[in-house]
Image: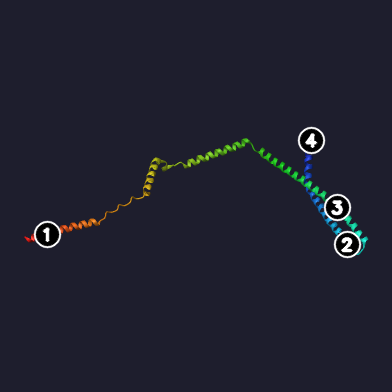
Amino acid sequence: MLKKLLPKTKSKKKKEAASSAIPTLDRLHETLEMLEKKERFLQKKCSAEIEKAKDYTKSKNKNAAIQCLKKKKLYETQIEQLSNFQLRVHDQIIMLESAKATTDTVDALRSGSSAVKSIQQSLNIDDIENAIDEANEQTENMRQIQEALATPVGASADFDEDELEAELEDLEEEDLEEELPEPPARIPAPVEPLAKAASSSRQGSDLSELTKLQAEMAL
C-alpha cells in the first residue's frame, strides 16, 4: 500500500515544482532588474562625487575633496557587491530555465508516448485485417459492376465484330486511295502539223478535179 502511495506523492511534488518554476523565474527577473537599477544609481553617485572632488580641488579644499573620494570608494564597493549579486541571480535564472526546459521536454515525451500507447491499444490486428478484406471486396464488386455496365446489350450485342472490322479496313483503304496523288495528265499531241497535212490533201484534191474539168472542156 505504501509503495502505491509513494509514486503518486512523488509525481504530485514534481507537478508542483514545475508549476512553481514560472513564478520563481518572474521573481528572479524582478530581483535582477532591481539590482541593475540600484547599480546605475550608485554609478551616478560615484560620478557626482568625482565632480565634487574636482571642484574642491580647484578651490584648494583638500579635505572636502578627500571626503568625496572616500564616498566614491564606498559606492564602488557597493557596486561590486551588486555585480556579484546579479551574477548569482543570472546563474539561478539559467539553471531554473534549463531545469524547466528539461521538465517540459520530459512531459512532452511522456504525453507523446501515452498518446501512441493509447492509439496502439485501440487498434486490433484482426480489425485491421477485416477492414483490408472489406476494402478488397468492395473494389472487386465495383470492378464487376463496371464490367457489367460495359457489356453491350440489345441490338448492339448482335453485331459481328469481324464484319465491322472488315468494313473498317475498307474505309481505311478508301481514305488511303483518296490521299494518294493523282497521275499526271497526258500531254496532247501537237495539232498544227496534222492541220497542215489536211490542208495539203485538200489542195491536191482540188487541183486534180480542176485538171479533170479542163480536159473534159477540151473535148
Where residue 30 appears, as percent x and y from the top left, is 81, 52
Q: Amino acid at mark 2?
A: Lys
Mark 3 is surrounded, within 10 Å at the Cα level, by few (under 14), some (14 to 19) or many (20 or more) other residues, namely few
Residue 164, numbered label? none
Give the residue type that dot 3 points to: Glu
Q: CA distance from mark 1 to mark 3?
A: 164 Å
The answer to whether mark 3 and mark 2 are in CB contact below 8 A is no
Amino acid, disc 1: Thr
Q: Earlier in the sequence, mark 2 or mark 1?
A: 2
The quadrant of the picture occupied by the N terminus is top right
Choose mark 1 or mark 4, whichever is in front.
Answer: 1
The answer to the question of whether label 2 and label 1 lie on touching residues, with beta carbons closer than 8 A, is no
Q: Which residue is mark 2?
A: 54
Residue at x-position 79% and y-position 44%: 17
Kind of element beneath mark 2: helix
Left or right: 24 as drawn, with respect to 130: right
SS for tag 1? helix
Nearer the camera: disc 1 or disc 3: 1
Q: Which residue is mark 1?
A: 211
Residue at numbered disc 3: 80
Query: Nearer the N terminus, badge 1 or badge 4?
Result: 4
The span from disc 3 to disc 4 (Cα, nearest Å) is 51 Å
The answer to which of 124 and 20 lies nearer the viewer is 20
Q: Residue at x 81, y 52 (%)?
A: 32
